[in-house]
Amino acid sequence: MSCLASNPKTTSCTAKSQIGGLRPTVWALNLNASDGTKLSYTKTGNTISAITIQSGLAAYRIDGEKFAHDLASDGVKNDGGNVYYQPTLNIRSIVDTDADITWLDDMVKATNLVFIVEKPNNTFLVVGQDSGLSYLSGTINEGGQTADSNIASLLGFQGQEINPSSLLDVGTGYEDTLNYIIGLETPAP
């Protein structure tokens, strides 16, 4: 039995003008708490409307500059017909302080992270929602573009997911969804 493509994809001129990279803020969440409790989602179709965070944990905001981060997702189909998605998220951040170095060390050591990323068209994706992403071994520091540029640290995260990334939308528009995500920055009771 073969699987057939059955959904068209059109892109408006407005959407095409917004193509260029992710917005500057990304949020990281732990898929699993230290006691093994997993994030849970309220989901309809491919849209998540709520995320339940484990007690004591929160979404961790990662600020960057516009187009500092990029996301790619490969669809992988094995000879036996198994299909999975392999999202790769690259985060670039300037590491200048002691606290920045601690953050960098935490991110490299963390496993099974879920990321919320904002696309240029004011929509949000939840990446790594089922299995999480982990640090992809490689060079961390990259040089600045000019002699007076600061050096940004590049951290790559990759995972293997059964499903493609889902949209995050609380159902009442962009601002409400953004405020909902910001609310996730407060540790859950």
Image (tube, rainbow, N blue to C red):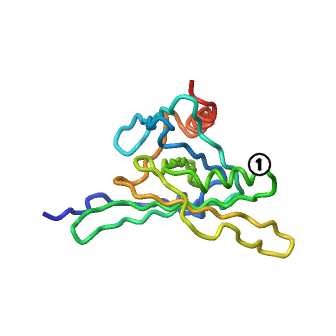
Which residue lies at the image location 34% right of the left edge and 42% below the top edge? 45
Relative to 123, say whether 178 is above or below: above
Q: Is residue 114 left or right of residue 9?
A: right
Q: Is residue 26 left or right of residue 42?
A: right
Relative to 8, say whether 43 is above or below: above
Q: Position of residue 50 (x, y in %)?
A: 47, 34
Secondary structure under the numbered disc 1 in the rendered image: helix
The single residue placed furthest to the right in the displayed view is 148
Q: Quadrant of the C terminus?
A: top right
Which residue lies at the image location 54% right of the left edge and 47% below the top edge? 116
For mark 1, what is the residue? 99
Which residue lies at the image location 34% right of the left edge and 60% below the top edge? 84
Q: Position of residue 62 (x, y in %)?
A: 66, 49
Amino acid, disc 1: Ala
When asked about the image quadrant of residue 22, the answer is bottom right
Which residue lies at the image location 28% right of the left edge and 69% below the top edge? 78
Q: Quadrant of the N terminus?
A: bottom left
- From the viewer's side, name the closer residue of 78 and 104: 104
- From the viewer's side, name the closer residue of 176 and 93: 93
